């Protein structure tokens, strides 16, 4: 057994420490937090997990990527930590798999320069940005007037003072008011990890979120974005690369964070979740409705932060990358680069449906959606994953839940204890069952 294991490791260029590698050492937990940290269930496996050797072999001489082969491997066993960041950039649509290495290097450099320019703009307004520090206390009041901070020199405060003749427009006020909240969330983000003991790393996360909220004036920063961004900061050393990876992830999730006085963006997915449970488990749906939980608001956190709290850190990363691989569409890069995203996606979906070669480059979940025309984000794999989580607690919810507090408590028991692979398999089965029961009338 020992010799065969060694041969298997050599086969993947010695990147695996054993045929089945536990990954906790790649993302160390602070000693004082180890007792409470969820146990990691995912392990990297030679022959299943996408490792550096297989990843490098997936590129042609000039840099074209065999994305179909990469997706198959990820769907089987996730991605090895040594290459997670660079693979995520492709899964999230940062780069076109059909591009050359030289072309991608040009794009990367342009994006780094663009991020540096945006960050410089923000730094002129708030000098703390890019300083290696972060804000956790207000710098202006609700009227936009600057609050004197004794820890900052007068010159520095003047340098970041009010623009436009001493007054701030409303978008600038909202942005500056939000910066301390970003800081408070950052210091609570993944704080069990050794990585965030370093203030420089916390500041990098804060800078990215500060710049992003400056650019996205429509939505700005909403709590939970920190949980989405954190893994990118950990996996990608260059801050600009981490920003663009986060920006692409937000393209998929941005509408979930849109909130008004009368609605939340995630409500459309909650509504779909309700439809799914009603179709596959009408008894549970009826029980939840009787408890006044028919709007499924108890599932907001799962969908907003993509199950970061329901799984260990490593299992969460594995879950994300397998989901993204399963949902991968070969038009993702070009559609993100298009000025007319919606019409571009619709047109390209039809092209993919008619082209067998392109269809093979879709993930297994997306392939089924393309074939049936069900490409609305309300039916994202995450919604079916949420349904699978509820199904694991079917009996307990029916027997013990007498109110919404009970529902919250029962679902809270799963925090950090779910098995990502089993949950994904269950989600795919529910997807298949739902489509069959709904007779393909998936969307109203």
Image: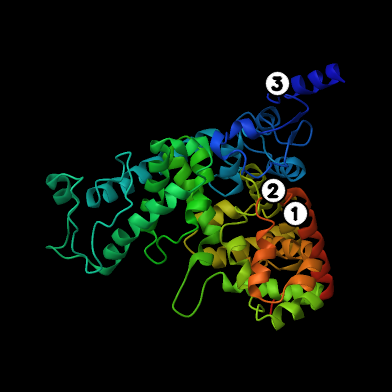
Classify residue 201 by image quadrant: top left
Which residue does the numbered mark 2 point to in the structure image? 322
Q: CA distance from mark 2 to mark 3?
A: 24 Å
Q: Are marks 1 and 2 in contact (CB under 8 Å)?
A: yes
Specify whether residue 350 is in view: no
The quarter of the rendered structure image containing the N terminus is top right
* In this rendering, the label closer to the viewer, 1 or 2: 1
Q: Residue visible at 74% across and 57% down?
A: 365
Q: CA distance from mark 1 to mark 3?
A: 29 Å
Q: Is residue 252 above or below residue 443?
A: above
**Number of other residues with Cα within 10 Å of mark 1, as a class: few under 14, some 14 to 19, many 20 or more:** many
Q: Residue furthest right?
A: 1
Q: Is residue 339 left or right of residue 60?
A: left
Instruction: Give the crowd class for mark 2: few <14, some 14-19, many >=20 residues within 10 Å.
Output: many
Residue 152 drawn above or below residue 252:
above
| Residue 333 x/y as whole percent | 56, 51
Residue 424: give its label.
Answer: 1
Where is residue 25 shown, x and y percent of the image?
62, 30
């Amino acid at each position: 057994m020992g010799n065969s294991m060694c041969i298997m490791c050599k086969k993947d260029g010695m990147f695996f420490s054993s045929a089945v590698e536990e990954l906790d050492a790649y993302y160390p937990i602070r000693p004082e937090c180890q007792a409470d940290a969820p146990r990691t269930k995912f392990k990297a496996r030679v022959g299943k997990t996408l490792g550096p050797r297989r990843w490098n072999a997936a590129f042609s001489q000039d840099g074209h990527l065999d994305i179909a082969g990469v997706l198959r491997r990820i769907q089987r066993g996730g991605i090895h930590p040594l290459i997670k960041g660079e693979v995520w950039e492709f899964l999230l649509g940062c780069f076109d798999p059909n591009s050359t290495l030289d072309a991608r290097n040009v794009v990367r450099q342009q994006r780094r320069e663009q991020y540096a320019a945006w960050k410089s703009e923000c730094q002129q307004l708030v000098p703390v940005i890019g300083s290696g520090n972060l804000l956790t206390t207000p710098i202006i009041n609700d009227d936009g007037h600057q609050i004197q901070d004794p820890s900052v020199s007068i010159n520095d405060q003047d340098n970041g003072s009010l623009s436009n003749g001493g007054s701030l427009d409303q978008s600038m006020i909202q942005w500056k008011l939000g910066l301390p909240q970003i800081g408070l969330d950052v210091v609570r983000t993944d704080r069990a990890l050794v990585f965030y003991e370093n203030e420089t790393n916390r500041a990098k996360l804060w800078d990215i979120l500060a710049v992003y909220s400056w650019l996205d004036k429509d939505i700005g920063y909403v709590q939970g974005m920190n949980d989405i961004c954190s893994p990118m900061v950990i996996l990608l050393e260059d801050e600009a690369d981490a920003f663009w990876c986060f920006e692409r992830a937000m393209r998929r999730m941005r509408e979930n964070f849109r909130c008004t006085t009368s609605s939340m963006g995630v409500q459309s997915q909650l509504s779909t979740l309700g439809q799914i449970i009603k179709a596959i488990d009408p008894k549970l749906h009826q029980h939840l409705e009787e408890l006044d939980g028919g709007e499924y608001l108890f599932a907001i956190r799962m969908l907003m932060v993509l199950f970061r709290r329901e799984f260990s850190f490593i299992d969460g990363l594995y879950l994300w990358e397998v989901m993204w691989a399963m949902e991968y569409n070969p038009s993702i890069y070009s559609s993100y680069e298009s000025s007319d995203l919606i019409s571009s996606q619709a047109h390209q979906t039809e092209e993919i449906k008619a082209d067998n070669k392109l269809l093979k480059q879709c993930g297994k979940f997306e392939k089924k959606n393309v074939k049936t025309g069900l490409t609305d984000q309300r039916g994202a794999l995450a919604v079916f994953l949420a349904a699978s989580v509820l199904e694991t607690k079917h009996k307990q919810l029916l027997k013990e839940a007498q109110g919404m507090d009970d529902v919250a408590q029962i679902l809270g028991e799963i925090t950090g204890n779910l098995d990502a692979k089993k949950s994904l398999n269950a989600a795919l089965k529910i997807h298949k069952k739902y489509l069959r029961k709904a007779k393909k009338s998936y969307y109203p």
